[in-house]
Amino acid sequence: MARTMPGKIDYSDFQSSVWEDVSPIALDDADKTAVYIHLSEAFQEIMGYFRAIMAKEEKSERALALTRLVIDENAANYTAWFYRRECLKALKSDLKAELDLISDIAIDSPKNYQIWYHRRAIVDLMNDGSKELGFTAEILDD
């Protein structure tokens, strides 16, 4: 039942004029790590734009879309989920739609702590946990 996140940006979108005002920030810690971890060029570029957006403290539709791309690459990225919540709050986004999105991701990755933390935070913001017992039961039944 895997679904990609609707409305997410594509890696190739970084070449468009929408991103011309953003300079990716490279992660330069190779000399500070005990073990080198190979990261794809695409992942490094995505994260470079993500670091740049966070450094600018930009909370926009494109920043929200970028968090989706980061999460699609690594759903366990706590910072991406945190920044996503910040964007959702700043943009006064539809939290019901966000909860639906989280549900789809949680079904595919039920042991991901970051998803559950984000879900709890969204439910708190909505002040409505009425569907949580049913959803949790559905996850446990799978």
Image: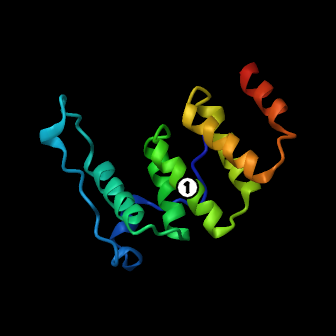
Judged left or right of residue 65, residue 3 is right
Residue shown at 24% from the left, 56% from the top: 26
- Percent of width and height locating residue 68: 52, 54
Residue shown at 68% from the left, 53% from the top: 98
Q: Secondary structure at mark 1?
A: helix
From what the image shows, is residue 45 above or below residue 34?
Answer: below
Viewer-nearest residue: 42 or 95: 95
- Percent of width and height locating residue 47: 35, 53
- Percent of width and height locating residue 5: 58, 52
Pick out the residue farthest to the left.
Answer: 31
What is the crowding at mark 1: few (fewer than 14 residues within 10 Å), some, or many (at least 20)? many
From what the image shows, is residue 127 above or below residue 76?
Answer: below
Judged left or right of residue 26, residue 13 is right
Judged left or right of residue 49, residue 58 is right
Q: What amino acid is labelled 1 in the image?
A: Arg
From what the image shows, is residue 85 above or below residue 134?
Answer: below
Viewer-nearest residue: 142 or 66: 66
- Percent of width and height locating residue 136: 76, 28
Quarter of the figure with the C terminus: top right
Give the colour scheme shown.
rainbow
Quarter of the figure with the N terminus: top right
Which of the 4 quarters of the picture holds residue 51?
bottom left
Q: Count the labels in the image.
A: 1
Viewer-nearest residue: 81 or 68: 81
From what the image shows, is residue 31 above or below residue 95?
Answer: above
Which of the 4 quarters of the picture holds residue 109?
top right
Viewer-nearest residue: 1 or 117: 117
Residue shown at 82% from the left, 41% from the top: 129
Residue wearing tag 1: 84
Residue shown at 55% from the left, 55% from the top: 84
